[in-house]
Every structure is written in C-alpha cells, then in structure tokens.
Amino acid sequence: MSEVIQAGGWGLLAGSALLVGAVFGFGMRVSQKVIALVMAFGAGVLLSAVSFELVGEAYEQGGLGPAAAGTLAGAAAYTSGNLWLAGRGARHRKRSGHHAEQTQPSEEKNSGSGLALALGALLDGVPESAVIGVSLLDGGAVSLVTVAAVFISNIPEGLSSSAGMKKSGRGKGYVFGVWGAIAVASTASAVLGYAVLGGFSPTVIAGVTAVAAGAILAMVADTMIPEAFQEAHLAIGLVTVSGFLVSFALSHA
C-alpha cells in the first residue's frame, strides 16, 4: 500500500475518535467527573507521546537546537492562534458547559462564534495529525504510539466539546459537521505531513516535529488539564500519570 494512503488512513483513524466522542457527548448524559477523568487520562497519554515520540525523536534527528527552537515556536504559534480565537468566542471550546461562566457562546450571543469554534477545533487537531504522517518518514512505519495517543486524547475532546456545543444551542448538524470536517482535515494533515516533508533533510523534519510537539504541549496545558482539574482535582494526578505510563509502555514495547 502506498505510504501516502497509509498516512491518510492513520490520520483518519485518529481523527475519527472525535466523532466517537461527539456521539457520547451529544447523545448521552455523561457525568462531568467521568469526562474530567477521561480528559486527564488523555492528557497523560499525550504528554508521554510528546516527550518520547516527538521531542525525543526531534532531538535524535536534529539535536538540541532544532528540537528546542521548534518546540518553543510551536507553543508560541498555538498560543497566538488560541488568543485570537478566544476573543471571538472559542475560549471554552473544550468545555462541556457545566459551569455557567465557562459555557460556549451561542451564535445569537456572539455572532461568528460558530466559525471560531470550528477553527479552534482545527487548530487543536492539525498538529497531532501532521506528526502521524511525519512518523512514516522514519523507516516507512507509522508510530502506533502517536496514533494511539491522538486517538485516546481525541475521544474526551469530542465528548466534552460536543456537550458544550449542545448546551449552547447548536444542533446535531453543526456538531457532527464540525467533527466530520476535522476528521477529514486530520486525514489531509497526515498526508501533507508525509508528502511535503519527505524530501527535506532530517534537521528540517526534526524542527517540524518539534513545532507540532510544542503546539500539542501548549494545547494540553491550556485546555485539557484545566478542564480535568476543575471537575476531578483530587484524582487528576493519579489518572494523568496512569495515562502517561500507558503511553510510555507502548513506546517501549
């Protein structure tokens, strides 16, 4: 099978977890504590994958300079985009809407917030999917740990955010349209990550991998951990460490 098709398939698989989470978040009443615990576990999985699969790989390929510079650049880019979107109604895009002061705004309350929420979901999902495609460049085999980490972390994201969208008055067509589009974008990102970077030097690939890692780390710290801590702060440490260890075990299996 063509490696480009493989990249797209793995990206689609990881992105489809958003739709799985959306089904539960929109169609079922899931307790806030369960959402928080799953979010904490997903955060731990991503933290481990970023450490051992992404930043670690960037360091081995390009050395400390490209790895550190790329990670900082990715975090800065994500933070800048997130600040811009926050001012347009997407600050609480991963929130379930349980707390009144952290609900997602309706379109009537904040015109254009629907588009901002969709762009925010895209901002969160693209770096994760791109590194799936990039991982195929290392020996022609995808990093299953990265795919698993993105898949596991996408479920609580889709669950919590979809619950929040529903509470803000957005319909089924909007919710599943957004996550379906992000799943398609995840496929495209993985394909581009493989196809575009294939001809570049290991140093460039290391830098791009680190950029994605920095963006993912910033996303985890800014959106996933706060949501988890607010609802399950007494257990978040243990659950996050459990997710970290699961990912660590997969990366060293």
Image: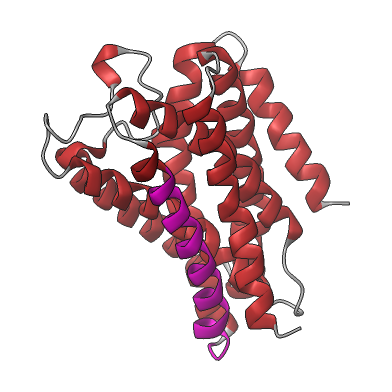
> Where's residue 142, x and y in %?
72, 68
- Is residue 187 in the magenta section? yes
- Residue at the spot 49% in from the left edge and 18% down from the top edge: 229
Q: What residue is drawn where x is 48% and y is 45%?
A: 217
Give the residue at x 42% y 44%: 218
Image spot of residue 74 (x, y percent): 40, 58
Question: Residue 81: x, y in percent?
Answer: 26, 52
Q: Where on the picture, by quarter, is residue 11? A: bottom right
Q: Give the range drawn in magenta.
A: 176-200
Asked if residue 185 is positioned above or below residue 114 in the image, the reply reads: below
Q: Is the magenta stretch mostly helix, strand or loop?
A: helix
In the picture shown, does residue 28 fall above or below 190?
Answer: above
In this rendering, does residue 218 appear at all?
yes
> Along the horizontal axis of the image, is 200 left or right of 10?
left
In the rendered view, does 32 fall on the left or right side of 251? Answer: left
Q: Position of residue 152 (x, y in %)?
A: 65, 41
One can see residue 59 in this view: no
